[in-house]
Image (cartoon, rainbow, N blue to C red):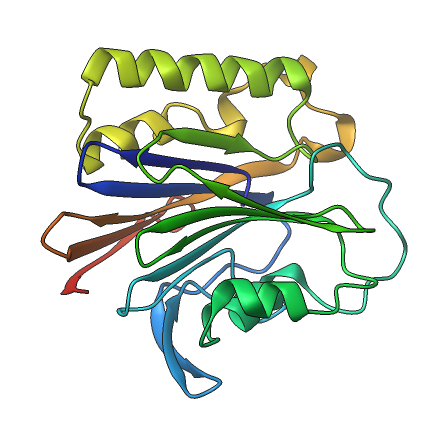
Amino acid sequence: MCTVSYINTGGQVIITSNRDETQLRSKALLPMPYTINGKEVFFPKDSHAGGTWFAYRKTGQMVVLLNGAKVKHQVKPFYRRSRGLIVLDIISSDNCINTWEELDLADIQPFTLVVFNRGELYELIWDGLQKSTNKLNALGNYIWSSVTLYPEIIRQYKKEAFHKFIDKYKKPGAADVIDFHASHKIDDLDVAYIEEYQRDIITQSISQLSVNPSGKAAVIHLDLVENKKYSCEFTI
């Protein structure tokens, strides 16, 4: 939920997410298919709130969650619904963007969604007051880091490291991107950059979806806590 990258190597799309979470939170379940609003949705399930940070469908939709919007917000004592459930609302709809625009997000904690919808790429932001819908160039390369965890100096460092990685590999493979994410975990950072209340947070998992030009897709989910791996392949 806290570092997400999108890479288009000139045909192959690779979307990868690091989930940074407190060690005290209930462990997430490995990815499985669930029926949500009559649609088959695949995701690793947050056993605490029942939602997810990483969901996809075999029909070509993908939604990834980051906590926070553009600036760090003041956390309120109560929110009416988990952000991970919003992910499921959107991924299980007939039209991701229309559903996003219609959703009532009052009393939902700020978040950012990266949505890949049948070849189109969107950045959707809820800052607690208003929504932003940004259509991005699906041929580009992007990295997002959660503002609730990472100060500006670390977000900038990760962005620079990402672009150096792209420059080095030109057309990195899915395994190369996994290695990049594995080398930029929150628990690898200098503790001076992490606030006191965040020091029990670790990178619990790395999840990735890659799709090649012919529509062949591969999913890898690495549970770094339980040292488990899930993988599957399918055709969109």
Q: Is residue 40 left or right of residue 233?
A: right
Is residue 159 among the parts visible in the rendering?
Answer: yes
Which of the 4 image quadrants contains residue 169?
A: top left
Is residue 47 among the parts visible in the rendering?
Answer: no
Q: Is residue 159 left or right of residue 165?
A: right
Residue 197 position (above or below residue 155)? below
Residue 211 position (above or below residue 8)? below
Which sits in the foreground, 189 or 88? 88
Which of the 4 image quadrants contains residue 20?
A: top right
Q: Residue at left 30%, top 35%? A: 139
Residue 14 position (above or below residue 120)? above
Q: Quick one: which residue is furthest to the bottom in this view?
A: 38
Q: Quick one: which residue is furthest to the left in this view?
A: 214
Q: Is residue 4 left or right of residue 108?
A: left
Residue 68: x %, y % from top left: 69, 42
Residue 146 position (above or below residue 22)? above
Residue 67: x %, y % from top left: 64, 45
Which sits in the foreground, 114 or 35? 114
Residue 164: x %, y % from top left: 34, 11
Number of marks in the rendered image: 0
Image quarter in which the C terminus is found: bottom left
Which sits in the foreground, 206 or 190? 206
Q: Residue at left 83%, top 62%? A: 107
Q: Residue at left 58%, top 21%? A: 155
Q: Residue at left 49%, top 66%? A: 96
Which sits in the foreground, 132 or 25? 132
